[in-house]
Image (cartoon, rainbow, N blue to C red):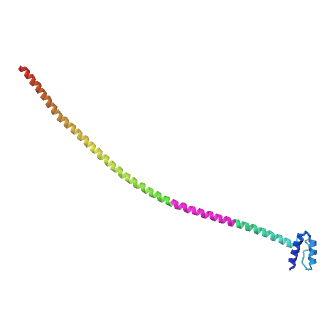
């Protein structure tokens, strides 16, 4: 066993039994090994303890650094997961947007086709209205002509009837005079 290991072992035992540094020095001499003991550590703090304290502090700092690194790693993996989910959602939105634009384009095309059909039907309706107006005008003219013809035809018959009536009256008048 090295002198340092012996010193550390005895130091641990001394601290277990609440022995002071003086007792520790005595115990080291009793073991019979020559140990380079710091005799200036009467106050309980040796260079090795200071070094041990530094190592403990470094260990705590390293543990703290390890905790920070683990936290960063976890945060980074969560951020990466969130980023991937957002990327996936963005891709879904882009795909959905493209589909909606295609549907919009198809509907606009359908609307344009329907508009052309409506324009054609409007033209046909306009032509039918013009034809109807022409026929109505033609029928009205024919009605007027027919009415005129009937008046002209009915007038001679009425005149003829009046003449016949006058003839009968004259014949009666002549017969009365003859009597």
On the image, the x and y values in percent for residue 156 come to 15, 33
- In this rendering, position of residue 158 left or right of residue 117: left
Relative horizontal placement of residue 108, taking residue 176 as reference (left or right)? right
Q: Please provide percent x and percent y for residue 6.
A: 87, 77
Corner quadrant of residue 45: bottom right
Residue 138 drawn above or below residue 117: above
Is residue 82 on the magenta stretch? yes
Q: In this view, does 98 lie above or below 8?
A: above
Name the chief secondary structure element in magenta. helix
**Which residues lie in the magenta part?**
72-97
Residue at 81 percent of width and 69 percent of height: 56
Q: Measured from the top left, where is residue 163 in percent x and y?
A: 13, 29
Q: Was residue 74 drawn as part of the magenta stretch in this picture?
A: yes
Total of numbered circles in the picture? 0
Horizontal and vertical percent position of residue 73: 68, 67
Front-most of residues 41 and 16:
16
Q: From the image, which quarter does the C terminus lie in?
A: top left
């Amino acid at each position: 066993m090295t002198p340092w290991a012996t010193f550390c072992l005895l130091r641990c035992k001394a601290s277990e039994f609440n022995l002071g540094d003086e007792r520790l020095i005595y115990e080291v001499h009793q073991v019979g090994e020559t140990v380079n003991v710091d005799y200036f550590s009467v106050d309980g703090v040796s260079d090795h303890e200071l070094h041990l304290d530094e190592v403990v502090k470094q260990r705590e700092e390293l543990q703290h650094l390890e905790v920070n690194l683990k936290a960063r790693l976890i945060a980074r993996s969560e951020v990466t997961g969130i980023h991937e989910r957002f990327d996936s959602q963005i891709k879904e939105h882009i795909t959905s947007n493209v589909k909606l634009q295609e549907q919009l384009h198809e509907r606009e095309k359908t609307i344009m086709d329907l508009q052309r059909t409506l324009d054609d039907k409007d033209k046909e309706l306009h032509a039918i209205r013009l034809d109807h107006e022409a026929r109505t005008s033609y029928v009205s003219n024919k009605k007027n002509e027919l009415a005129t013809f009937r008046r002209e035809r009915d007038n001679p018959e009425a005149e003829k009837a009046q003449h016949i009536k006058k003839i009968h009256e004259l014949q009666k008048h002549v017969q009365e005079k003859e009597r």
